[in-house]
Amino acid sequence: MFACIFIPDFSAQALIRFEPELRARPVAVLTGRPPLEKVVALNERARQRGVEAGTTKSQLEAWENLVLRARSEPQETSAHAALLDCAQSFSPEVEDTSPGTVLLNLAGLEPLLGSLPKIARDLAQRVSQMGLEANFAVAANPDAALLAARGFSGVTLIPEGREAERLGDLPVDVLLESFSSDAEEAARWVETFDRWGIRKLRVLAALPGVPVSERLGQHGIRLQKLARGAVSRNLRVWEPQLIFAESVELEYPIVLLEPLAFLLNRMLEQVCARLRQRALAVQELHLNLELATTQPQDYASFTRTVASTLTQTFTRTLRLPTPMLDAKVFLKLLQLDLQAHPPGAPIVKIHLSADPARPRALQSGLFQPVFPEPEKLELTLARIAGIVGEGRVGSVELLDTHREGAFTVRRFAPVEPAPAAPAPVKPKVKQPGNRKEDMSMSENGSAYRVDETVEENAKENAQEKMSAVIALRLFRPPLGASITLREAKPVRMRCLEREDIAGEIVWTAGPWRSSGDWSEQEGWSREEWDIAIPAKSSCQLPVPSCQSNEREPATGLVLYRLVQDKISGNWFVEGTYD
Amino acid sequence: MSASPVFLSAVVGRPFIFSSPSSPRAIAEKTANRTAKILAQVGAMPKLGAVVPASRLDVRLAPEMVSSGIPQLDSLTGGLARGCLTEICGTASSGRTSVLLFALARATERGEVCALVDASDAFDPASAAAAGMAMSRLLWVRCGEKHPSRKPPSASWKNRRGNPPCQRWESQLGQMLKVTDLLLQSNGFGMIALDLGDIPVESARRIPLASWFRFRRAVEHTPTALLVLEQQPIAGSCSSMLVKVSSVSPQLLGNRPAHSDPPHSELLDQFEITAELLRSRLERKLERKPVQSTASFKSRAAWAG
C-alpha cells in the first residue's frame, strides 16, 4: 500500500507556516513582475470570499482585509523539506513527487506503526504539528493515492481493487493537473475532454480502449489507466540530503536586533524540530544575512529598486563544542554574537542552516568530578567574551617554539573525563608472627600485613615530584627599565612606568641568552637576568644591608626577571617571581 | 535484594557476591535481627549513650575539603573548602602565585574544570605548565582592554594606555566582578580563582563588601572552591579562610656580599614559603596535637629538575 501527502495551495501554506497568525485571515500569494502580479495561490478563507487564482493585483483591491504576500521560494523549499522529513520518519521509501506532494511506501509498516487508518491519522497529526494542512490518501498503487489526495480533502482510504469506483467521481482536470507536464498541456486536454463531454474520471475509464488509442494516442491510454487506478509502478525513492536550513525573504528590511531575534526564533524552532525527528543535534549553526546597501523610503520604491539593489552577504558561524538541540540556547548565542558583531546594514534575507551530528551520549557516575553543562558553559563563554573581548577568554595552548611566552588562546572546550575504573585489589602476603604488626582483616576473616614501607617511599617520591613550582607573574606588555651596569652586570634598576620598581640590585643571577627565528623576519635575541631589589612598601620589613656579615633572613625583597632585547638594546622588566 | 552490599562493594572496589535467594519472611527476620544488634551496640557505646534524633539536631554540614597539592599546607588548613571563599594574601615574591597555580593544577588533574579570572593579565602559561596544569581544563579570562594595543614596548613609553592608572584598575575590577558573577551562576567549576595580586591595595579595597557577600552566597552549597589571591585581605568576614604567605629564597641568605661572586654562578632554584593561617571559620575536628598556625614548604624552580 502507498500513501500520498498533498498540500493544497502549497505556496500559501508555506507562507502561513512561517506566519501562523495569518491562518485566521484571507491570504493571497502573488507572483510575477510588478505591476502585473497575479494570484498564484490562496488559502481557504480567501477562496470563500470569492478570490480566484489568476486575479490581478489591481483587481484584488476590491477585497478588504485581504493579506497579500509575494511568493517565496525559500520558504516553499523549507516547507517541502520539512514534509520530506516527516514522511521519512514513517517510511524509508519516500518519493519526492513535486513541491508539496510526497509519496510513501507503507509495505511492512503495519506491524510497526499500526493499521493503515492509524498510520494515516498519525501522518496527519505530524504534518499538522509542522504548521501545514494536507490531504492524505492511501491506495494500492502510488498514482491512485496521488489522485485521491489531490481530489479529496482530509484522509481517504481506498481498499485494493476499488480504485476505479472511488476515483470515478473526480473531475478530469484533477487527473490532468497531476500527470501533465505543464499547465498549458493540461488546459488543452481539459478543453478536449470537455468538448467530448468527458468531465468525470468514471466516464473516461469506461471508454473503449481502441478508439481512445486511435484518437488520443498512447498518452490517452495511459490517462485512461490512471483514471481506473490501474497503473502500478515503483516509487522513485528520494535520497535525503541532510540539509537542515530555513530561509525567509523580508518584505521590509530589518535594522533592529529585536525583530531579527523574533524571526530567528521561529526558524530555529523549525530546524530543531526537524532535527529532533531524526534524532540528530546541531554541531554548527550558519547564519547568512543578505544586507541591502540602499535604504528605500517606502514599499513602492523598494519594489522598484529591488532588482537593482546591490546586496552583500554577512555570515556568522557558531561552532558548538558538543552537539546540542536547544533553540533557546541557540537564539541567545546568536543574539550575543550579533551584538558583538552587528551586520552594519539593513537585512533583506535570512538564511539559517545547521550541520547535523549525532547527539552526545553520556553515562554519568556517582563519583565523577563536577563538570559544567555544555549549553550553560557556551552561553557563559559568549557573555564573558562580550565583557572582556574576543580572544581574551579560553584555554591556553603553548606553542612548540623556543620563543619565550609563545602561546595561543583557543576555544574552551573541556572534555568530560570518563568514569574511572575501580582500583584493582592488591594481593596481600600473609606474614606469620609479630602481633604488633599492622593487621587488616578481609571479609573472610583471615589476616594480612600491609607493606607500609614501600607505600610510604612511593608517596614521598610522588610528593617530591609534585612540589610547588615557582611561578612567574608577567607584566603585559613588559615594563621598560633603565639599568645601571657595572662590569657588564646590572647593579641598579629604575622602571620607567612604575616608581615602586626601582632600587639597588642586591642579588643577580644570569645572564641566560637565547635567540631564534633568524630565518624569519621576526628574529629575536634576548638576555635574561634574575634580580632581587628591595620592595618599596610600607608593609615590608626593613631590608638588611647586603654588606652585613650576619645571617639574617632576606625579607622585603622582590625577585624580578630582567630582560635585555639584544636587537634594540632596550631593557625590560618581564615579570615577578612569586 | 538490598542495594547496600552492591553499593559498598562498588565503593571499595571489591566484587560483590549475591547470597542465595531466600524467602521474603526469612529476609525480613534477618534484617530485623541485624537492626536490633546494631541498635544495641550503639546504645552500649559510652560516648553515644543518648542517641538524638536527626530532626532535633542543629547540624551544620562541614564543607568538603580538597587538597591544595601541598601536604604541609593541607595539614595547616585542612585543605581548600568547597562552597567557601578562601583568601590567599601576600606581597610580591611571597610565593602566593605558586600556591595558587599548584592548587589549580591539582584540581585540573582530578578532572575538574577550573577558571582563572586574571584581573591584571599576569598569568604565565609556562609556569602553569611546569606546575602540571591540564591546560584544556583551565579557563583563562584576561581582564583589561578588549583590544589591547599591539605596539611593541619601548623604553620611553611612560604612560602605557594613556588612561590614569586608577581608571584602568577600576575598569579591570569591574570586568572581574561581572565575569565572576557569570562563572558562579553557570556552575560546574571545581575551582574558580580570582587573581588580584597586582591590583593596588587601595583599588582592591574599593570592591564593595556586598560583592564579596554575593560571591559567598553564590558559591555556598556548590562544589566550587572560590579562591582570591590578593596583597592584603579585602573580603572581610565573607571569607571562610584567610592564609597569609611569605617566602625566603635561600640564595639571598648568607653573609657574602652580593656583588663579589660572578652572577652566572648563582641560580634561583627554590623558595621556602611560609604559610600562616590567620583565620578559619571552618569547623575542624579536635586533634591531639595543638593546631599549628604556620607551615613551611618549598617550591622549586621549573629548571631546577
Image (tube, rainbow, N blue to C red):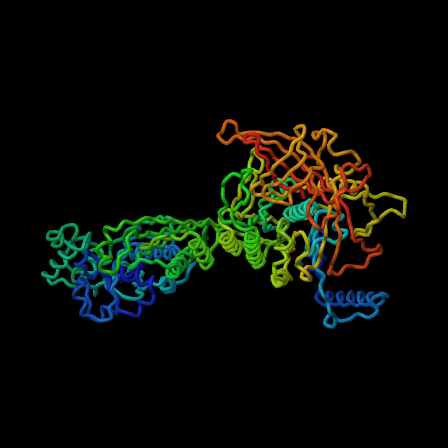
Outermost top residue: A519
Whether residue A163 is situated above or below residue A539 in the rendered picture? below
The x, y position of residue A296, in whole percent, is: 26, 57
The x, y position of residue A572, in whole percent, is: 59, 37
Q: Residue A83 sits in which quadrant?
A: bottom left
**What residue do we see at 75% from left, 46% from top?**
A542
**What residue do we see at 18% from left, 68% from top?**
A61
The x, y position of residue A128, in whole percent, is: 36, 64
Image quarter of the N terminus of chain B: bottom right
Whether residue A312 is situated above or below residue A14 in the rendered picture? above
Total of numbered circles in the picture? Answer: 0
Q: Residue B131 sits in which quadrant?
A: top right
Q: Is there any visible trace of residue B113 in the rendered image? A: no
Q: Is residue A8 left or right of residue B262?
A: left
Q: Residue A56 sits in which quadrant?
A: bottom left
Q: Is there any visible trace of residue B178 in the rendered image? A: yes
Image quarter of the C terminus of chain B: top right
Residue closer to the observer: B125 or A376: B125
Outermost left residue: A195
Q: Is residue A337 left or right of residue A560?
A: left
Q: Is residue B95 left or right of residue A203?
A: right
Residue closer to the observer: A115 or A79: A79
The x, y position of residue A182, in whole percent, is: 19, 53
